């Protein structure tokens, strides 16, 4: 039996949500995922619940983030969510101790095998960041302590490109599933052309890029990952949610692409903890 997992930052901005959500459902439903990690769930709209209902994923673990002095005024109340076809045997969360962020963890059983699935949206800062390294160190320690001989799958928007120290630290403990399958990470997962729709969005992206990268040349890179225990077999991993609406070529499901991975169910007696 195969376990199919996905991750997507769905963008907490509700402008054009009713158009985007249709693309999100179409793209995710095509993959028939067992479990999905979602980032940037809008708290007021509970965008995770709507997606779960449309995708017939009855088990939802929503975790709101804390607003802090660092949170920009334009950012709404938001959080992260795990949507699952399978009941949660247990669920837990980790305070990442900066920017009001948390990681969330569930245990599910598929085909007689128990898995730990973690979802998170990690420290935002352009380029390398000690804050992100600290969060990832907390994450790795917590995941390995949480596992009781189960394989671990950790997904999310890590806000760091593959060459940054935090992602190097993740690769010391886990395999980056896409890179394991393809020999390298995707060309980019963010931003999509969605951020350039309308002059206000375009101008905001220009200013953010100027602040973050000190250049007017548009930036793009890989920030989204699926990590897994090194001994966990991998069937496939692909970029998803990377196509625009057929009638509106700048309307994308989100400002990030998503990832999907499939894992053949390993022998339940095999020790494959990361």
Image (spheres, rainbow, N blue to C red):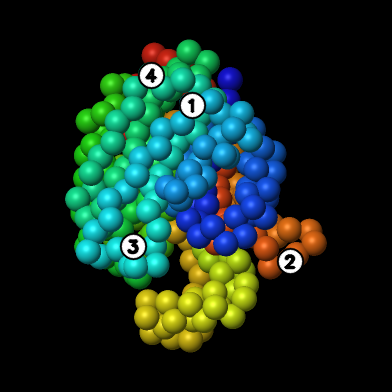
How many angstroms separate mark 3 from mark 2 (CA)?
29 Å
Q: Which mark is residue 59?
A: 1
| Quadrant showing the N terminus | top right
How many angstroms separate mark 4 from mark 1 (CA)?
11 Å
Whether the residues at callouts 2 and 4 have beta carbons within 8 Å, the answer is no
Front position among marks 4 and 1? 1
Horizontal placement of 213 versus 169: left or right?
Answer: right
Q: Mark 3, residues whose alpha carbon is within 10 Å: few (<14), some, or many (≥20)? A: some
Q: Which residue is mark 3?
A: 124
Mark 2 element type: loop
Q: Earlier in the sequence, mark 4 or mark 1?
A: 1
Mark 3 element type: loop
Front position among marks 1 and 3? 1
In the image, 249 versus 156, the foreground residue is 249
Q: Mark 2, residues whose alpha carbon is within 10 Å: few (<14), some, or many (≥20)? A: few
Q: Which mark is residue 264?
A: none
- Name the residue rendered at 27%, 51% in the picture: 66
Q: Earlier in the sequence, mark 2 or mark 1?
A: 1
Mark 4 element type: loop
Whether the residues at callouts 3 and 2 have beta carbons within 8 Å, the answer is no
Query: From where the camera sits, is residue 91 visible?
Result: yes
Q: Which mark is residue 89?
A: 4
Horizontal placement of 267 versus 182: left or right?
Answer: left
Q: Which mark is residue 249?
A: 2
* Residue, far front: 44
- Residue 85: % across, % down: 54, 25
- Residue 45: % across, % down: 49, 47
Q: Mark 1, residues whose alpha carbon is within 10 Å: few (<14), some, or many (≥20)? A: some
| Quadrant showing the C terminus | top left
């Amino acid at each position: 039996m195969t376990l199919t997992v996905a991750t997507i930052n769905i963008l907490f901005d509700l402008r054009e949500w009713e158009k985007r959500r249709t693309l999100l459902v179409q793209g995710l439903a095509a993959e028939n995922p067992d479990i999905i990690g979602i980032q940037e769930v809008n708290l007021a709209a509970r965008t995770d619940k709507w997606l779960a209902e449309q995708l017939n994923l009855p088990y939802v673990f929503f975790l709101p983030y804390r607003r802090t002095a660092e949170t920009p005024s334009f950012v709404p109340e938001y959080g992260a969510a795990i949507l699952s076809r399978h009941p949660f045997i247990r669920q837990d969360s980790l305070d990442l101790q900066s920017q009001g962020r948390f990681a969330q963890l569930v245990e599910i059983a598929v085909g007689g095998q128990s898995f730990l699935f973690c979802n998170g949206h990690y420290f935002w800062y352009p380029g390398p960041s000690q804050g992100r390294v600290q969060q990832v160190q907390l994450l790795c320690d917590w995941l390995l302590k949480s596992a009781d001989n189960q394989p671990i799958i950790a997904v999310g928007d890590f806000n760091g490109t593959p060459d940054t120290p935090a992602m190097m630290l993740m690769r010391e403990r886990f395999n980056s599933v896409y890179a394991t399958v393809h020999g390298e990470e995707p060309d980019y997962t963010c931003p999509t052309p969605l951020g350039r729709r309308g002059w206000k969005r375009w101008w905001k992206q220009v200013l953010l890029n100027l602040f973050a990268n000190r250049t007017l040349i548009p930036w793009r890179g890989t920030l989204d990952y699926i990590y897994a225990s090194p001994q966990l077999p991998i069937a496939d991993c692909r970029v998803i949610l990377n196509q625009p609406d057929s009638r509106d070529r700048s309307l994308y499901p989100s400002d990030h692409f998503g990832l999907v991975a499939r894992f053949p169910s390993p022998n339940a007696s095999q020790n494959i903890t990361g």
